[in-house]
Image (cartoon, rainbow, N blue to C red):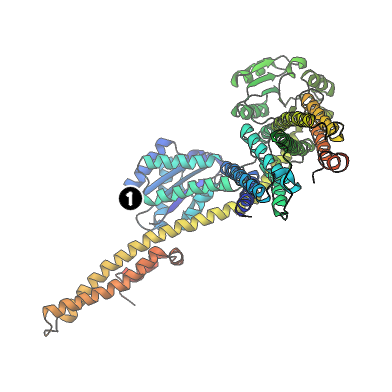
Amino acid sequence: MEIVLVGLNHRTAPVEVREKVSFTAEQAQRAAEELRSRGILEETLVLSTCNRSEVYGVPPESSHECAPGLSTYLSEFHSVRADILSVSLYHHYDREAVRHLFRVAAGLDSMLLGEAEILGQVREAYRFAHEHGATGPVLNRLFQGALEVGKRVRTETELGTRPMSVASAGVKLAERIFGKLNERRALVLGAGTISEQVVSQLRDRGIAQLHVMNRSRDRADELAKQFSGKVVGWGEWGTALQSPDVVVSSVSADEPVLRRDIVERAMAARGNRALFLMDLGVPRNIDPSVAELYNVYVYNTDDLSEIVQQNRNARESEVPRAQGIVDEHVTKFLSWQASVELVGLVDALRVKMREERASFIRLRMEPMKHLTETDRAHVEKLMDEMLEKLLLEPAERLRGEKELRRKIQNVEALRDLFLSNREKP
Amino acid sequence: MNHLFPILTALAYLLSFSLYVRFLGTGKKLTGRLGTLLLGLGLIAHYFALLERSRGLHTVPYHDLYGSMSLFGWLLALTYLGLELYHRQQSVGAFVMPFILVFFLAAHLAPADRLSPPAAHGATFAFHVTLSILAYAAFALSFVLSVIFLGEERLLRSHKLGNMVWRLPPLELLERMSKSSVLVGLVSIAIGTALGFVWVDRLSSEYSFYDPKYVVTLLVLLLYVVYLRLAGTAAWRGARASRLCVFNFLIVVLSFTVVNLYLSQSHRYF
């Protein structure tokens, strides 16, 4: 009942390798079937995202023994040379494999610390493997535990609550002023990549209306079409600034394009309704003195980057709490695993003791001819009672006492000690 | 006197406060909902505590300072709960609960003196007082909301966001909540004052119409009408309106303390 994990991620492999070793859903299913049919693993789950490809499994024998076979299989499956793959692959066993998965689900192992998407990807990978019958009792328990860890970390810590990109920080700030953005309007000045990122975030929040203003009309049309917006002619400030609540600017210009007098006139025309300006241009597109105007909030790239940095620090300060949750669940899982294994061990011991008892009685009582059948039956019954007492009590304690199960770290050692067929030295 | 209801009220309010604070820190919806639920339970227990206290002292809740404070706390909690449910926003609970708790605890920890039975002023008078206290509670709530608005607005303008700003209600929602609260206060004080005049009119031989309290109350009414009017205009919407709301509440406090105690002839109860 050991657990093995072989995989690579953004820390161990460059994107060129990661893209070669990634799995589509069909590939994940095929790999899981082949690994089981070849007897490499009894239970399998493939977790493949843009930043990681990992195979979790329960091998029939020792996890350490099956890992090389698993690496070779991955190399063959993806047609990547073994020497290239071997430098990127990591192998984790049992406790470390469990810990790794729980950290992944918590977002502690992600490129962007605390990102939320990974939990959905873990959930989806588990659902897929479970539906295709690739998982069994161990991986079911393991992944249910991982999902619980991810959920707890997201609800009990602030690891994933704060925006971590300039675009999302800007959008979150707009929400601090206006609340939900689904009835709000936005104006985008410039149609570059940064604008696109912010517009994408605004669309995700359901922004009601989007206007695009760009020097190049074609590019403005393109962006407006992509996000179902409308184009406003360059420089038509009177119309453009009257309705939006949020303005995102990332224009390439040496001088500020939004001067104080333009915004002043716009604010008068819009009855001083709050206006949030996101200046993502370098040099700045918005005259700094605009920030002094009543009900106008201006954030430039540096301001937003500073917020992102503060949030990153805040997220990092949450890592110990998240790690605490991970450790708690690792202990819980290992305790469950040990209890299942220990109960199995006790049952196996009982069978072995019965066999030993039968052989012992046969050998030792054979010469005792004076014993009647009743005496023999009586002795056998007494021995049974003694063996049951010796085994039953510890078995019951093992079932009931978590702490005892936790203390017994290596069930295999007990198995070797009591059930090994080797001769005593 | 039975202490069961005061203890239950204090426990419910304290738990509600801690849950609202936790909600502010974590944003966990369930925590916020539990905070609301406990506030509701606290309100029910507080009602019975008020009832029991009044029966025990053979008087109405507003007959003494402590009873008035407890009634004020109850009406503040009731107004806040109404606003929270209407605007579906629980981030303000952590800021309002301390006021409710302070008023409740101060009122119920005070020694219960045996008071003279209240004069039989009748239902008009009872409504006048209760509605006036409700108005003060609603104005207090709008004050708290305006202070939060000003603090948050300052943080956003200075770009010093800190940890809490991400959990506070959006500025525009705070403005709306503050206006709703003022509206509740205005309606209450208008009806309450009108009932007061009706009552005085009936007893004009005993009470004078020329009391500074009337002037200040009408001033408060006027100031809040001005606030509601200005809060939607171009020049005042936002921080300026919130500052006016804070100023108005200072006049309310003045009316409740200095005017009642030193200037008014007919409102010096305590």
Relative height, residue A287 to residue B95 (above, below): above
Q: Hey, which quadrant is residue B112 in on the image?
A: bottom right
Using the image as rendered, state which of residue B193 and residue A135 is in the foreground: B193
| Residue drawn at x 41%, y 45% as measured from the top left | A45
Secondary element under disc 1, as helix, strand or loop, is loop
Tell me if I can see residue B15 in this picture.
Answer: yes
The residue to which callout 1 is attached is A39
Using the image as rendered, state which of residue B236 and residue A352 is in the foreground: B236
Residue A89: where, in percent of width, then height?
A: 49, 49
Residue B150: where, in percent of width, then height?
A: 78, 36
The quarter of the picture where the C terminus of chain A appears is bottom left
Q: Hey, which quadrant is residue B24 in on the image?
A: top right
Using the image as rendered, state which of residue A253 and residue A150 is in the foreground: A150
| Residue drawn at x 87%, y 32% as measured from the top left | B210
Residue B157: where, in percent of width, then height?
A: 78, 35
As shown in the figure, which amino acid type bears the numbered disc 1? Gly
Tell me if I can see residue A163 in this picture.
Answer: no
**In the image: residue A197, left or right of residue A237:** left
Q: Count the marks.
A: 1
Relative height, residue A5 to residue A341 (above, below): above
Using the image as rendered, state which of residue B99 and residue A47 is in the foreground: B99
